[in-house]
Image: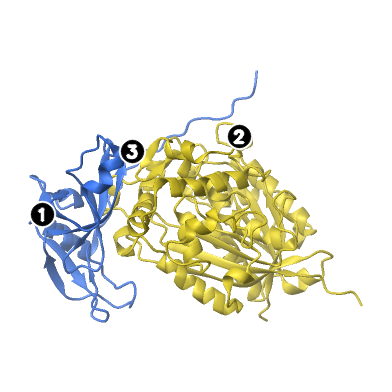
Chain colours: A blue, B yellow
Amino acid sequence: MTSPLTQTVHWDLTYDVHLGSTWGRFMQGLREQKILANSCPECSRTFVPPQAYCEACFVRTQEWTELPAEGDLEVFTVVWQGFTGGPTPPYAVGGIRLAGADTLLMHVVTGLDFTDPATVREQLPHGSRVRAVWAAERTGQILDISHFEPAG
Amino acid sequence: MAQRAAVVGVGITDATSPRKQTRSHVELCQDAVWAAVEHAGISPADLDAVVVGNIDGFEGTVLGGKHVTRLLGLGPHLPMVVLNTGGTTGGNLMQVAARMVRAGTHDRVLCLGGPTFFGVRDLQSAINTNSPMIVEQPLGMGGFHMGAFAASAYQARHGTTVQDLASVVVADHRKASANPHAHLRYTLTETEVVEGTPLSSPLTQPMVCPVSTSAAAMVVASEGVARSRTSPAALIRAMGTSSDPYLGGGKGDFAVMENLAALARRVYALADVRDPRSEFDVVEVFAPYVHMQPMQLEALGFCGPGEGIDLIRSGATDAGGDLPTNLSGGPKCTNAGVAGELAPYAYTALQVMGDAPESIQVPGARTGLAHGTGGSFFQFENLAVFSRLDPQEQS
């Protein structure tokens, strides 16, 4: 009989992560169906989600703006194999360029027919217009936007 | 006094799957360390410090580096630095050790990367613990899903087909089959890659790295120590690291590796590399997902945008080509986490020392480029240029 090779270890830990004032304000905005961004005073780039400091200029961000809840889908992937605790595949996650933003907002994208994997990309080509669909119950978290759907 | 640093010893264990691995984490680390110390021709008492990498949450341990170091059998009073920079831990190990040597306060520093993800049941949910919490983690992206964004954007930009991507996998497996330390040593056809289980479009299972178990270690020494040896060392001519914004959405353009291109310009300037394509004899890049290798070759200045796959298909990056790249098979065929990230440095150093496994050694290699990257969306890059350092002629 061979020696045992492994023994099972299990971690199951829950954390309360503090949002801070910048993301706190962003999350409060989502609760009110507003997508809030802020900008760097030096390079004028606009960040969504907002950030306290510009990562290129290393200065504090300033001006807050509300962005439209619609944008262009620049990239997406179809998840065929998920993971423990994640959504049930298939589903799509994309990077959305909201008008006026210099970053992409990552979010779940719906409205795709997954029947034929080979045609999924063509259904939403680069730059397809998508719009945010708000969750009925909003609690101040990223999934207050339920998902983005084609706006065409 | 500041001094130059060189790699004088490398140890790499054979890799296998977690299921087949009969050695523990600590035992693999011991094997790699003792092989590196022996290759360096020094005794453990000569070491001034150890830099050990671990990624706590990924390894089912906390402070794994601390307990491992005590159990290496290297003796007492050995100063230790634990490095924990997530996916770039392995790629940063040599950078930290070399800075310690260059500062002139250390002459021989051991760096050690053990196996990460050792036995984790669901790697994607483990990797997802390091994706940006709060705004991106809840969206259903694990490791390869985040990798797939760049693959998808690159395809859209250049019209790259799934078949094109598959050709890179075929080349990696062919190379790994010649490397005795590699994990996946079987060859594949393009059709097998294309028809593999879909994971996250456009990636199929064979386009994504395996979970491997192995360990790697290196001894970084001062130029004086390196020159007093009887065999060549790998002088670290230049090195550097660079970061993009942490959020995936901060990357801006997924179809091009702008951050790596910026780092390459900086490191090439330090090393006085003017024509990378002709100056490097050997290259090892950290490309666990299929699209990464062509994109990296482009960012590193070896070809133009969208030409990476043609370069690989041309045979230039094969053994015998003018730019042998990832002759180890790369992380696509062997990825043991921290050890896997240290591997490009370990293999490149071995190549310029002339001590790579015979079946993958580039004859006469003198100049090499090693690359590492990590972060959920590969926001963090690291790079080093090595040159063969011959022993001082005895007068």
Q: Nearer the viewer, mark 2 or mark 1?
A: 2
Q: Which numbered marker is on residue A31?
A: 1
- Residue B317: horizontal and vertical position, in percent? 59, 57
Residue beneath the point at 58% across and 41% down: B213
Chain letter behind tag 2? B
Q: Is residue B389 left or right of residue B158?
A: right
Q: Check disc 3: other Cα within 10 Å, few if <14, some if 14-19, many if 20+.
A: many
Residue occupied by mark 3: A82
Q: Is residue B99 left or right of residue B208?
A: right
Pick out the residue farthest to the top. A1
Chain letter behind tag 1? A
**Residue B74 visible in the displayed image:** no
Q: Is residue A16 left or right of residue B124?
A: left
Q: Earlier in the sequence, mark 1 or mark 3?
A: 1
Mark 3 is on which residue type? Gly
Identify the element where label 1 is drawn. Answer: helix
* Most foreground residue, A109 or A150: A150
Report whether mark 2 lies on the same chain as mark 3.
Answer: no
Identify the element where label 3 is drawn. Answer: loop
Residue beneath the point at 64% across and 42% down: B177
Pick out the residue farthest to the right. B395
Instruction: Tell me whether circle 2 and circle 1 mark residues in contact (CB < 8 Å).
Output: no
Question: Disc 2 and disc 1: Cα gap in Å?
Answer: 50 Å
Split into 4 quadrants, where in the image is the C terminus of chain B? bottom right
Residue beneath the point at 75% across and 63% down: B364
Residue occupied by mark 2: B21
Q: Nearer the viewer, mark 1 or mark 3?
A: 3
Which quadrant would residue B111 be assigned to in this image?
A: bottom right
- Residue B69: horizontal and vertical position, in percent? 63, 51
Mark 1 is on which residue type? Arg
Mark 2 is on which residue type? Gln
